[in-house]
Amino acid sequence: MMNQQEKKQILRDAQEWFTTSIAANHIKNTRKLVDPSKLTINPFTVVYLANFLTGRSDAIGIAKALVYPRVLGSSISTSFGTGMQNFVSNVLSAYGSTTSGIDIEFIDALDGHKKFCQLKAGPNTINKDDVETIHSHFAAIQRLSTTNNVRVTSSDLIVGVIYGDESQLNANYKSLEHKHYHTVTIGTNFWHRLTGDDSFYLDIIRDINVVAVNADFTDELENIIAELATKPEILALVR
């Protein structure tokens, strides 16, 4: 179980990680959107979406219909997902693992047993193929532990999901639990097991949001949309 000093350090590190990794990558990816080749433009629907979103089908309306979904959806989701390794290395470095296929190792604050944990970003971030890959990593660890006469059970090989709650886990996570008998722990429960603090999940969200409220990118975003609207690929769609 972490002490208050360790807790404060992880919260500070989480703020720094969000600023330098998630926010910085989001801004970098957003700036690329002045280039139409960075966007997938569906000419059958984009004018409809422009009118649906802005009530206009001019170049600005079309540019907004193309940019907004990227910057508010897929771009930040991708940044968060790819930033997970950075998160493990910097924020959770005290728990880092040298075991193949494992991100962190820790003593579970709830049952007192050592856990070998793969970290995932959210409740929809693994697919069917990932299930077998994760299980293979875990099975290899169990075989090695048997050889070395070390206690490692299926319940000690877990997937820790950074955010969300159990009701949101997709079918692939459920398969890990019900088919392969591995524990998937998510959100509040994961952070409680890791830190011994049942309020840590809310604390880390709160501290990251302190940084997030300073993220005002509105002026530059409008400039990006205005520049994109001047491109021939966009003007060709104007009705």
Image (cartoon, grey):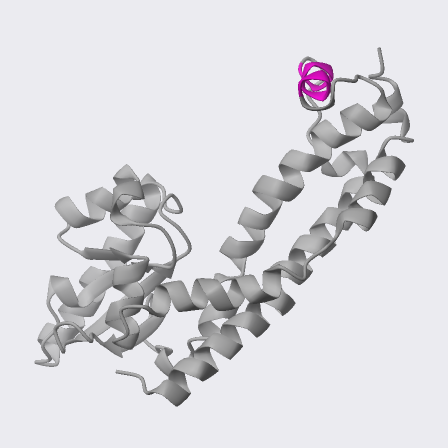
Q: Nearer the viewer, residue 181 or 145?
A: 181
**Residue at x 75% of width, y 31% of height:** 64
**Residue at x 9% of width, y 76% of height:** 151
Quadrant for the C terminus, please. Answer: top right
State which quadrant residue 5 falls in.
bottom left
On screen, 43 above or below 217? Answer: above
Q: Nearer the viewer, residue 1 or 234?
A: 1
On screen, 130 above or below 58? Answer: below
Residue 202 visible in this rendered orientation of the protein: yes
Image coordinates of residue 31 in percent, x first then y, are 78, 49
Residue 46 within the magenta-colored segment of the rendering: yes
**Residue at x 42% of width, y 55% of height:** 121
**Residue at x 73% of width, y 23% of height:** 54
Residue 53 within the magenta-colored segment of the rendering: no
State which quadrant residue 53 falls in.
top right
Image coordinates of residue 188 in percent, x first then y, are 30, 60
State which quadrant residue 228 falls in.
top right
- What range of the chain is rendered magenta? 45-52
Q: Nearer the viewer, residue 128 or 124?
A: 124
On screen, 130 above or below 2? Answer: above
| Number of numbered labels in the structure image | 0
- Image-based side of 207 in relation to 183, left or right: right
Image coordinates of residue 57 in percent, x first then y, are 80, 17
On screen, 199 above or below 97? Answer: above
Magenta stretch: dominant secondary structure: helix
Residue most extreme to the top: 239
